[in-house]
Amino acid sequence: MKKLAIVISILMLVALLVPAASVLADTGTQVTVGGTSTATSLPFIKAVWVQEPDNNITLASGAIQNVTNYLESADTSHQTHGTQINPPMIFNSSITLDFFCVASDPAGVSHILAKNNGDIFSWVYSPAVSPSPYNSPTDPLGGGNFKYKVDYIYDLGYGTIATTDVTTAANDGLITFGPVASQDPDISSEGATVGSPYTLANLTNGTGTGELDKGNAHLFEGVAVLTYEQPAGVYTYNTWAIDSAANQSNALASQFTYKGIPGIETDFTQVNYGNVSKGLPSPVSGDLTWGNSVPTVRNIGNVWVQVTVAQNDMSFGIAGTQAGTTYTGTLLPTFNPSPATGQTNWNVTFDAKMGTNADEYFDPTAKGLSMTNVAILPGVLGLSSEAEMDFSILLNNGLKGSYNGSMVISAVTSSFGTTNGAVANGTGEVMTTEPAIIYVPVTPVVTTGTSY
């Protein structure tokens, strides 16, 4: 009835303005809203990329940490195509990511603007090897490993700001260019070829014929975050544009890499073995309470880790004339000045354990030398997980007195999956090229007793 009323009122108005002797022409009009899309009516995505803003680490307190990222923190010299991102390696922190998209529409870029009921968004997916629970969410169509939707709510328009951003990202190798769309009305002026990827020159160039030069495309931005414990690997994302007539573009797929780095921190700076006696182990037990100086360790990286421990001999030395052994294992080695397999000639043997896993016994290295005999403790410390640490010393031979030494606690990457006693969904390896970050050098202390 609303359409009928409109038509009648228009005809009445025209009748009043036309002289009585005139003949009225019946002119038809038509409009379709949300009709069937055709290939020539679809909006299209020209380019997408992800980059890191500077000072983008947000701490648990809400404070922002001062850091310069050069658009991608894990590849600041831009040697690898695509965006490479380092985790913050700070407990309970997160990093900000800026998502960018260059999009247009055959009927004009105004049709995809939010103010005109347009929409531009990406669906982001966690790496295929992600453990539970990161592999369980699904996208609106039922696809797995769904992380979140990013809405490009900021229209950066065209002109100097947009062309500078695009040029910088392209020169640094961050951009994924989409295929030239057949419905693009500017193909000839851009010198583009249908089906081939768009180029930077198609978007901006010295002749002013690029779509971001003329305003026939706009640069859009969305913002999202990754928390410190998000699983390492390749994150994929698909980007769409929808215009005011509900025409949806083809998806442009791209990806970025969350670099895998193993990292732990502890809440203790010393292991005091106390008063020990020859031949009797002296244990030091940890707990699961953070911050009370009773040994606890937690994972602050974005990969599963195994905790490693190395310790010097605190000047107890070795027995016999052979070179010091380098034993590590879950069985206590037998003391022998002329050792065979499974034995030790060190005057002191150490033991460490993470959580409820098996003990790992290991030989020290000589005090004053770099600690090369590194024990990898059984068990896996999962993402954003913590565990108690237990230690023990066994004095095989030694004189009375007080002894001081040093211990290094670090971590190595353990693959997401079912290795090393860990159970999780998904299989595969995690890229890890950086060395483990060593956070706290621990000072062990021992005082020998009088009972031997």
Image (spheres, rainbow, N blue to C red):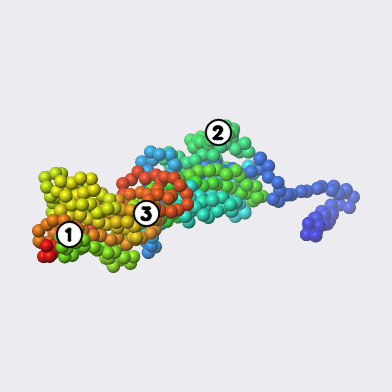
Residue at position x 24%, y 54% from top? 332
Quarter of the N terminus within the rendering: bottom right
Toward the viewer: 52 or 307?
307
- The residue mark sitting in front, 2 or 1, is 1
Residue at position x 71%, y 48% from top? 35
Quarter of the C terminus within the rendering: bottom left
Task: Determine whether the residue tagged by mark 3 lies in a helix, strand or loop.
Answer: loop
Taking 15 as reference, is 257 above or below it? Answer: above
Task: Determine whether the residue tagged by mark 2 lies in a helix, strand or loop.
Answer: loop
Q: Sequence-wise, which precedes: disc 1 or disc 3?
A: 1
- The residue mark sitting in front, 3 or 2, is 3
Do callouts 2 and 1 mark residues in contact (Cβ within 8 Å)? no
Q: Which residue is mark 2?
A: 196
Toward the viewer: 21 or 195?
195
* Amino acid type indicated by mark 1: Gly
Q: Which residue is mark 1?
A: 279
Would residue 174 appear left or right of 191 to someone viewing this image? left
* Amino acid type indicated by mark 2: Ser
Q: Sequence-wise, which precedes: disc 2 or disc 1?
A: 2
Residue 173 in view in this figure = yes
Q: Which residue is mark 3?
A: 380
Residue at position x 39%, y 55% from top? 382
